[in-house]
Amino acid sequence: MTTPIVDDDGFHELDDDEFDAQVEAQIALFETAEFWEDEEQSYAALNTERRRLRDYLLSADDLDKIPPVRWLIDGLLPEDAIALLYAEPGAGKSFIALDWAAHLATGKEAWQGRALRPDTRVLYIYAEGAPGLRKRRDAWCTYHHGGAKIGTNLMFLVRAANFLSLAHWDPSVEAEDDWTELLGIVAELRPHLIIVDTMSRAIPGKDENDQATMSLLVDRIDHLRETSHGATVLLIHHANAGGTRERGSTVIPGAINTRIWLNQENILKVTKQKDDQEPVLGRVELTPVEGTDSVVPIYIEVVDDGPDNETIRRRQILEYVAQNPGTSPTGMHEAIGGGKEILLKALSKLEHEGHVQVAKVGNRKAIYPSTPEASEETQ
């Protein structure tokens, strides 16, 4: 064993045992990425490259090998997907996300009657401060878990992580950037669910209306999913000023698999899902928990979702068309989500009333705003 050397700048040269321990820890970290064939591949993929494009090449017959959709929360959060939960600031979306995370991590059998994936590991990237988070955890444990602890299946990263920082790995550089370090954390923990609270904190200083920026964010999210071997990434985001859709570029709603909206009436509902259903999950009430300094979300069954679906769709259509003139009905539906039949019915009425124009452009239809009243109705 050599004697540690410290130079004038305070640099600590590793002795033999320390060096060997770091090497072993690094190898163990890379071996957690089981979908790479050997240590060298995992090293390169974790720090510099994505899985090869050729790995995703399938014949038409190979499509039969793709498993059916599996669920973290049955009918709500699919596995290996991108999901979005959005609401106005202060509405309670972080309480809902913590409720889902804790139910999954503690091995509960169901959430609101929906079956849960057993033995689920969750990484929650929470940027709003640990003291408040501790109070929320205590309230959840008291109300749902008999005061017992949640355990290590739920891990928190209690600082915002910059998803768009430069990705690099250089042994001569002491400080890793956020993105490279996050890849290492995810490769080590292998979570099934990664919650990003909030999306805007993951892109500090960037314009969430910029398509190039948001496209890069989606690419980084896909990279996280690969590194974790198929995690679902749940983005927590703010609604726009009208409260009708998520804030920012349409890149995100176009890329996500599942879209969940906590509206202005505190109704929680799915507005985009693979099976094109719109299940209403209930009215959310944040209820104080006795003996704690926080609340838990309680879900009250509702027959409908407040304003009827057509009224909501009219406002969403007018707002989307104003921001994206010339959009096609298909493109609009992919961005807005929800039931296509309801959306097209609302579009037809808006066209009949003169609020929008539907024109034929080549082989497709294009939708344009047509009157000042169209923008006024979105206010």
Image (cartoon, rainbow, N blue to C red):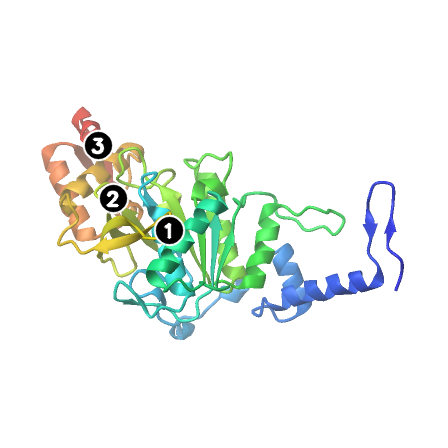
State the image coordinates of residue 249 (x, y, percent, origin top left): 38, 39
Counting residues from the N terminus, which is met first, the one under dot 2 or under dot 1? 2
* Callout 3 touching callout 1 (CB < 8 Å): no
Residue 378, numbered label: 3
Q: Amino acid at mark 3?
A: Thr
Residue 271 lies left or right of residue 145; in this view the side is left
Counting residues from the N terminus, which is met first, the one under dot 3 or under dot 1? 1
Q: Residues within 10 Å of mark 2 (few under 14, many from 20)?
A: many
Question: Label 2 belongs to which residue?
Answer: 263
Q: Quadrant of residue 321?
A: top left
State the image coordinates of residue 161 (x, y, percent, origin top left): 54, 46
Q: Nearer the viewer, residue 134 or 209?
A: 134
Measure the alpha-carbon separation of dots 3 and 2: 15 Å
Q: Is residue 83 visible?
A: no
Q: Nearer the viewer, mark 3 or mark 1?
A: 1
Question: Label 1 belongs to which residue?
Answer: 292
State the image coordinates of residue 353 (x, y, percent, origin top left): 10, 34
Which residue extends farthest front? 291
Residue 320 lies left or right of residue 168; in this view the side is left
Q: Nearer the viewer, mark 3 or mark 2?
A: 2
Q: Amino acid at mark 1?
A: Thr
Counting residues from the N terminus, which is met first, the one under dot 3 or under dot 2? 2
Q: Secondary structure at mark 3?
A: loop
Q: Residues within 10 Å of mark 1 (few under 14, many from 20)?
A: some
Q: Nearer the viewer, mark 2 or mark 1?
A: 1
